[in-house]
Amino acid sequence: MNVTQKVDVYALGITFCHLTTHKYPVDEKNIEKQEIKITQMKSINRPPEIKDDILWDLLSQLLEFDPIKRISAAEALQHQYFTSPEAYADISKEQQDLASQATVAQSQGNSMITEFDKDPTFIVEQSVIEKYILEEIRLQKLNEQNKNDNSHKQYGNEGIQSIFEINENEEEVMNNDQLNSHQSNNDNVE
């Protein structure tokens, strides 16, 4: 397997990790810090959200830093996470129905159907996708709210102070204008 495909497997591992934890395995604020952290690490640390040992075994092989040791895409598909009796027991009726519909569609001449469309282990239910998207939106809103809360804590008093400063400056300008206007009137009278 060439290096490009091994990089793709690593990227798949990052995506799979993000799908299961809603976080990236290494998530620094900027690219320089990200690179430094990765070069200092010997491997990706197991996120506390991942309780399943079989899932972690697959992810750690997908996220292996050494491309020679990294699992291939074909090997990943044969991993027990996808092939164990538990994995097959998790196949829902909806997945089975969709696979059956794809098989029927192919037999009726639909050339767009692939082997993956007919295999229920490769089918993700719409409800699962919707649940993931809603959770992702909820987490993004929570992060934005936390950022806003922190910025108010950090800059809140400065904003109020600057409003008072503006009011003081406006009063000073108005007083100066009145003084200048008064002096100008006095000059005209003399």
Image: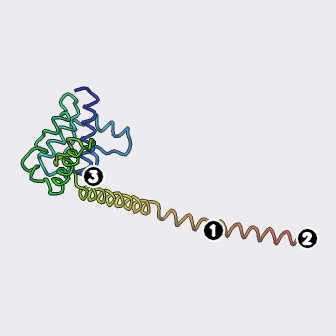
Residue drawn at (56%, 63%) of the image: 162
Q: Is residue 125 above or below residue 168?
A: above
Which secondary structure lies at badge 1?
Answer: helix
Q: Residue furthest right?
A: 190
Residue 76 percent location from the top left of the image = 17, 38
Amino acid type indicated by mark 3: His
The residue that disc 3 covers is 22
The residue shown at (32%, 58%) is 139
Name the front one of labels 3 and 2: 3
Instruction: Name the secondary structure under disc 3.
Output: loop
Which of marks 2 and 3 precedes in the sequence? 3
**Residue of label 2:** 188
Q: Residue at x 42, y 61 (%)?
A: 148
Quarter containing the N terminus = top left
Nearest the eye: 93 or 161: 93
Between residues 123 and 86, which one lies in front from this camera angle?
A: 123
Alpha carbon distance from label 1 to label 3:
49 Å
Mark 1 or mark 3: name the one nearer the start of the chain: 3
